[in-house]
Image (tube, helix red, strand yellow):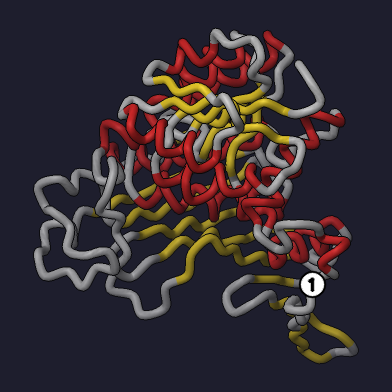
Amino acid sequence: MTNEKVRVGIIGCGGIANGKHMPALKKIANVEMAAFCDIIIEKAEKASAEFGAPGAKVYSDYKKLLEDDSIDAVHVCTPNRSHSFISVDALEAGKHVMCEKPMAINSVEAKKMLDAAERTGKILTIGYQNRQRTDAQFLKGESLAGTFGDIYYAKAIALRRRAVPTWGVFLNEYEQGGGPLIDIGTHSLDLTLWMMNNYKPKYCIGTAYHKLNNQTETGNAWGDWDPEKFTVEDSAFGFVVMENGATISVESSWALNYAYPNEATTVLCGTKAGGDMLNGVSINGIRQGRQFELKPDLSCGGVAFYDGNGGDDPSYREALQWIQAITDGTPVCVQPEQAFCVTRILEGIYESAKTGAIYNF
């Protein structure tokens, strides 16, 4: 650390940086956003004007930003394909790295990030902010307490009915590596593995569909998509078997004729009880020979002076926990090895969908 404040550089000043990373960092008193980079320089300039510390610098080449020795950490908020090489370069330049999800476009690229973090001794984490939601924290607490026993079946659900992102490079398979599975399925799978504390997949089988992306009257939340540009899957599904025999069903879609959309949720089935996030948090089981369902009230929260600025915003919680890891040496919530496992499973589902065969890890 160069001074009392953590000096952060933002690489990629698009939607996720403006919607999540920069607003969250702005709420943290000991953070200075001191540098901004985007290949479209006007985006970096706009971000600097809105979020930057006095004297913040602007770049169109991220390597120039990394040459600044006063920068302690960077947030990588670029399209998926560039996550790996930018993160590796940043780690090698002596910066701590918060990389937006997914970790990388495939497991080979993700492994490069793991190796670079180990080689440099710098902190690496991945932006799975849904772990910081109140419902996720409650369910995780119950899992740690042994409420569910041995969780042997789970569902990772990321189903949208008609909510295809039509901006940026979301529909570009080359830049993103896929569609809803790698975009929102990654959040649900991360939550599920985290709840289970199980990161050892054995094999999987997957399917990916291009059934609706050629339609023109779409009813899409963000306006009709362009079928010519919609090169990724509109939905994908996987069945994963872990080394200990547990199974996970993965469901993801941007467009699906399904009346009950639910995103970034998990269902857990254990030997002692079950739990889910389908309609608020619910825990079910047997007591005194009777079936029961417990629905905790998570609306009251804490008190403002204790929770601090940011309250229940999971993006703020993620950013605060990340900055504390840098300043205090506390472990990051999302360990890079965990994110690596998510990437391996996503890759396995995609590969199985292409070959029609079981994918062995």
For image coordinates 31% across by 57% down, the residue present is 235
In the shown orientation, is residue 100 left or right of residue 312? left
Nearer the observer, 235 or 244: 235
Nearer the observer, 286 or 5: 5
For image coordinates 24% across by 39% down, the residue present is 172
Question: On screen, 67 above or below 90?
Answer: above
Residue 188 % position (x, y)? 54, 55
In the shown orientation, is residue 330 left or right of residue 80? right
Find disc 1 in the rendering and name its residue: 301
Q: How many marks?
A: 1
> From this viewpoint, which residue is outermost toward the front?
54
For image coordinates 66% across by 32% down, the residue present is 32
In the shown orientation, is residue 139 left or right of residue 23? right
In the shown orientation, is residue 332 left or right of residue 80? right
Determine the image quadrant of residue 135: bottom right
Question: On screen, 246 above or below 138?
Answer: above
Q: Is residue 138 visible?
A: yes
Residue 99 % position (x, y)? 55, 32
Determine the image quadrant of residue 43: top left
Nearer the observer, 50 or 242: 50
Which image quadrant: the N terminus?
top right
Question: On screen, 128 above or below 276?
Answer: above
Q: Amino acid at mark 1?
A: Gly
Residue 353 % position (x, y)? 32, 44
* Element type at mark 1: loop
For image coordinates 72% across by 71% down, the residue present is 274
